[in-house]
Amino acid sequence: MSIILFCNVSCNDSDRIELGFDETPYIKIQQNQFKSLTMIDEDNLESEQVINTIALFLTEPFSKEIVYKYIDIGSINMNGYRLITLPLQLSELQKKDIYLITNYKNINLSTVNTLDDIKKLTTPAVDKNHDLVPNDGFCMYGELLNYDFINANSSAIVNLERTCAKYRVTLTYPENPVLSTDNTFVIANEASYTYIINGLRTGIPDVDYFNIADPVILKPDGTGKYVNTIYMYEAEKAPKIYIYTRINNSLLKQEFSTELPVPYRNFIYDIDIQIYEDKNSRTTGLDGVRPQYKMKAIVRTNPADR
């Protein structure tokens, strides 16, 4: 009889409330894959999903005042998501707006007390000598508004988006795949940071854009292509890529350049750089007539205006 009585009490929600029982609330963190209008990044690299630190802020619905703040809250790595256990009871939460920031490194979040304070936050900075590296953890942001912790049928789910864009660069010589050696590129006009909350990319001044110092190596993939990937913070200005290559093992390194799409957060861009012989242009030198080359750039996943 005692076992039956126990089950009746523990399984009846109204009895739980009357007797003062409560439950522990949870938040699930899911990461959105890099995307474009036409595709989702099939790579979804494990390194791009690194989460080192999590900051959690809760406000009353549609309020700017933060009522609960956790600067470095722990989480459990589950299958396909992170699980946060809140040090509160459901009855303390009721409905809340949820804001999450990850991988903020040395940014001081202790002074964040309102939503306006969050809007002022910028990501950890990079510079010409320090590019964004996936294994360091990309700064990500997510929010879930007016969530009802009491009446929801499942845990709160917050989708995070990376504050940077992903560019996959591929260099080919369609007429002769083995024509070039020592292939590298440099990015100019890259933003050193962005705002953690999306929609604020226009606030980055000109002085906070830079050109990377060290060329990025385009690595042969065994199929006649030279490839590498670079990540850049969301920004208003379009970056520019400079390709450097030695054609026919020439001692002279040639330069080709083109403007890249404006980086939007969590978007992926496939940049195909193709170099052809220019049939209408040749140069005469001491060693005879030398062909000239021209570049064609194809952006396969450029998003529409936003």
Image (cartoon, rainbow, N blue to C red):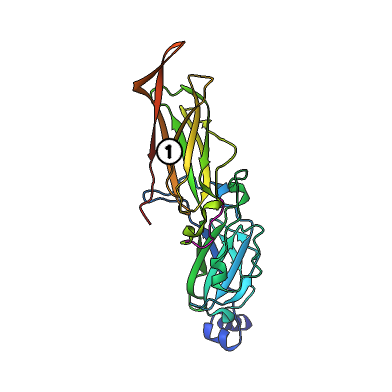
Q: Is residue 70 magenta?
A: no
Q: What span is in magenta?
A: 192-198
Q: Nearer the viewer, residue 133 or 3?
A: 133
Q: Which residue is located at x 52 percent, y 43 percent?
A: 230
Looking at the image, the residue that sits furthest to the top is 287
Asked whether 297 or 23 is in front, the reply is 297
301 lies above or below 104: above
Residue 110: image location, x then y, percent = 66, 69
* Residue at image coords 56%, 79%: 93
Residue drawn 52% across the image and 56% down it: 205
Tell me the chief SS of the magenta region. Answer: loop
Secondary structure under badge 1?
A: strand
On screen, residue 100 versus residue 283, left or right, reads right
Q: Residue furthest left?
A: 280
Of the 4 image quadrants, the one containing the N terminus is bottom right
Of the pair 279 and 156, the residue shown nearer to us: 279
Query: Residue 194 lies in magenta, yes or no?
Result: yes
Number of on-image labels: 1
Residue 255: x and y in percent read 48, 30
Query: Which residue in the protein does label 1 denote?
Result: 258
The amino acid pointed to by label 1 is Thr
Residue 21 lies, with reference to residue 246, above or below; the image says: below
Estimate the x, y position of residue 61 in percent, counting from the top left: 49, 78
Answer above or below: position of 96 versus 281: below
**Residue found at the far bottom of this picture:** 18
Q: Specify whether residue 32 is in view.
A: yes
